[in-house]
Image (tube, rainbow, N blue to C red):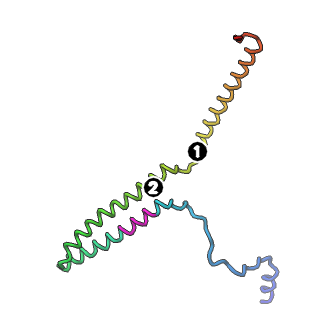
Amino acid sequence: MDDLVEDALDRDIPPRKTRRPLWVEEPVGRPRMPDPVRRAAVRAVLVVSFTLIAAVIAMLGAAGESWLAAPAMLTAIAFTVAATWAVLDVWITRQVWNQRNGVVSSPSSAARRLRRERRRARRRARSEARAAARRGHLSGTGARTA
């Protein structure tokens, strides 16, 4: 038995950490929504939740044959229209924000390669034009007005 204990003590076992942090920050997978889009989304969630509450009240009122069933149903219909608009507002606000502020994107390697080739061709054409202008100027074929 003592041999097992000594063997365990002789091994190169790393010491156990004394404490693990309770809270570990992890990077977010997606960036935060822009403020206008977030505000529209919060409005939409609130309106949709009120719509669901109104629909439940209307359904329970109809099941219980209450006089509140008809006004609750009309309210639920109005809230449904408002909820539809609120959800569309989130989508529209997001589209407008993307159009105004642009979407951060990185070009693909193919697009980068094509741009690099076009840039090289333009530089080559400019240097050839400069060389041709220098040759024309030095040979005296250039027309002088004076």
Q: In the rendered structure, are the residues bearing label 1 and label 2 in contact, judged by CB atoms less than 8 Å apart? A: no
Residue 47, given in percent of the width and then of the height, sits at: 35, 67
Q: Earlier in the sequence, mark 1 or mark 2?
A: 2
Label 1 SS:
loop
The residue lying toward the viewer, choosing from 144 and 9, is: 144
Is 89 colored magenta in this rendering? no
The answer to which quarter of the image holds residue 26 is bottom right
Q: Which residues are magenta?
A: 39-47
Residue 19, given in percent of the width and then of the height, sits at: 69, 80
The answer to which quarter of the image holds residue 93 is bottom left
The answer to which quarter of the image holds residue 39 is bottom left
The residue lying toward the viewer, choosing from 73 and 97, is: 97
Residue 6, given in percent of the width and then of the height, sits at: 81, 85
What amino acid does circle 1 point to?
Answer: Pro
Residue 134, given in percent of the width and then of the height, sits at: 74, 18
Between circles 1 and 2, the one closer to the viewer is 2
The quadrant of the picture occupied by the C terminus is top right
Q: Residue under circle 1?
A: 107
66 versus 104 height, above or below = below
Please identify the residue farthest to the front as the structure is shown: 146
Label 2 SS:
helix
Please identify the residue farthest to the bottom as the structure is shown: 1
Q: Residue under circle 2?
A: 94
Label 1 and label 2: CA atoms lie apart by 22 Å
The quadrant of the picture occupied by the N terminus is bottom right
Q: Is residue 69 left or right of residue 110?
A: left
Q: Looking at the image, which residue is at 47% across and 60% down? A: 36
63 versus 112 height, above or below = below
